[in-house]
Amino acid sequence: MNEQQKKQMTINIEPSSADKKSEQKNKDFGQYFQTTYTQPSLKDAKRRGKEDVQVHYDFDIPEEMRGLGNGKKFLVRTYGCQMNEHDSENMAGILLDMGFEPTSSTEDADVILLNTCAIRENAENKVFGEIGHLKPLKIEKPGLVIGVCGCMSQEESVVNRILKKHQHVDLIFGTHNIHRLPHLLKDAIFNKEMVVEVWSKEGDIIENMPRARRGQLQGWVNIMYGCDKFCTYCIVPYTRGKERSRLPEDIIAEVRDLARLGYKDITLLGQNVNAYGKDFADVNYGLGDLMNEIRKIDIPRIRFTTSHPRDFDDHLIEVLAQGGNLVEHIHLPVQSGNTEILKLMARKYTREQYVELANKIKEKVPNATLTTDIIVGFPNETEEQFQDTLSLMKEIEYDSAYSYIYSPREGTPAAKMEDNVPLEVKRDRLQRLNDVINELSAMKNKQLEGTIVEVLVEGESKKNPDILSGRTRTNKLVNFAGDRSIIGEIVHVKIIEAKTWSLNGQVVENAEVKA
Ligand code: 5AD
Ligand code: SF4
């Protein structure tokens, strides 16, 4: 840790016990904390310096912390994206190495970590609701450690709110210091004071942290961290630091390990994977080059997320066109179908450029399936501009899409824009957009009726244990009758019936896959 980080690391937030906490309810905590606590700063988080990214290979849990969890249980509750899910796997790995055992029950847990998402207000509200629900448990069991981590912890307003209103929280840490968890937890357990450590920095890369992966078939591999795109609505560049790529050899070694362990479906993760390698000073090596190497590894399915259309280059398309284990599913968030709105969002492409890219992908990559993200009700979005989004959906014929109502995020440029669109209008637009998404999804699924698809069998269907379910290469859910012995295998399934969000089929042997 460098000197600046040390300075930012501030602990000793009183009060220390539940009793003291209730007594101090009426104090002016705002003033008090300003003198003892360096809060996360969105302004500092925005800085993009010139200094090199440090890659650390020396992660270790000190001996005295290894037994700290013996006889105790942990629960990590995750909100938000796959990046967060994967971070939770790191936290779980660290906690297991410290001797803790996992539990899914809050009542049984000695440590509860809420790994939070800051992307929309409703995501944050859910977390604050959960923090409130945990209070009676903390009063009942004062030794319980409640921690809040992830993207919300990187926001100063969130940290202040927890400090003032949720004093039963014991630990707050951010996205840049997950590797500090053993030390922070030790402080939280022994000091009985609220431990707060959030680094508003651009970020380093910490290799070889332990990881407890949730699945045995599907695995995530980080290829890069952070985001430098600064779309005007988005909090991520502030909560996750600057774009920094893992070295290809580290990524390839991890994918090879997963192949050896029998994983069948790998998702390469980054907030903006198409910027992979742009931060390497001395080599010209991008996502296309990386995919070209990874496709040679003996693993049946490789995918990546999330793409930014601006950096999606021809070399990557050429590599993806070779198919094989590189799946033909591309998640390509567009956000809006209107060029003026895209400009206000600072997406750095026009509708026409996006359509051109999508068409190129469809032309070059056989059976390419596109999915997307859409925001409706961006400040001052007119009905006409919204209509452009609807028409783009139909033009591209997405297989599915995630749709959201715009949510102002403090500290982002869009949050300062005046907005004349009432919430009812935004809700109505979301409904109309979802109708189109569902129609397209049903239509796309219908086209698969009668075809034979490759399915990775994941397990019993959630609704009916006599039915198995799995995913196509393009991530569509397929339900079919079959023996449990094929769980974990890739089988061929003939699609008999298409539903809006899933497919029903029958296993066929030795079939030639057409779709
Ligand atoms: N409001 C609504 N949706 C947002 N997203 C990102 N920021 C916001 C926001 N402020 C959506 C985008 C992104 C997805 C992960 O979340 O569509 O692609
Ligand atoms: Fe949420 Fe974005 Fe953070 Fe993921 S990176 S948890 S989507 S704010």
Image: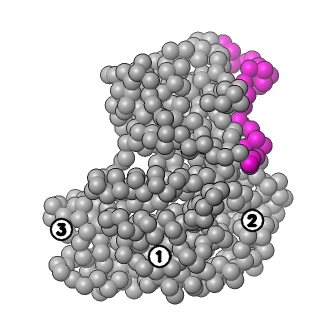
Q: Mark 2 highlights which residue?
A: 345
Task: Tell me which amino acid carries mark 1.
Answer: Leu
Question: What secondary structure do most residues of the magenta stretch adopt?
Answer: helix
Residue 387 at least partly seen: no
| Of residues 480 and 499, the one drawn nearer to the viewer in this rendering | 480
Question: Residue at label 3?
Answer: 482
Identified at 76% across, 52% down, the residue is 412
Residue 164, image x, y percentages:
69, 26
Assess whether residue 111 is covered by the magenta stretch: no
Question: How far, Cα to Cα, is label 1 from label 2?
Answer: 28 Å
Say left or right for 13 vs 471. Answer: right
Badge 2: how crowded within 10 Å, few (<14), some, or many (20+)?
A: many
Quadrant of the drawing holding the N terminus: top right
Provide residue 21's location: percent of width, then percent of height. 62, 16
Chain part drawn in magenta = 22-50
Where is residue 482, by image quadrant? bottom left
**Disc 3 within 8 angstroms of ligand 1 (CB):** no
Relative depth, front residue between 129 and 51 = 51
In percent of the image, x 51 and y 30: which residue is there? Answer: 181
Disc ID at residue 320: 1
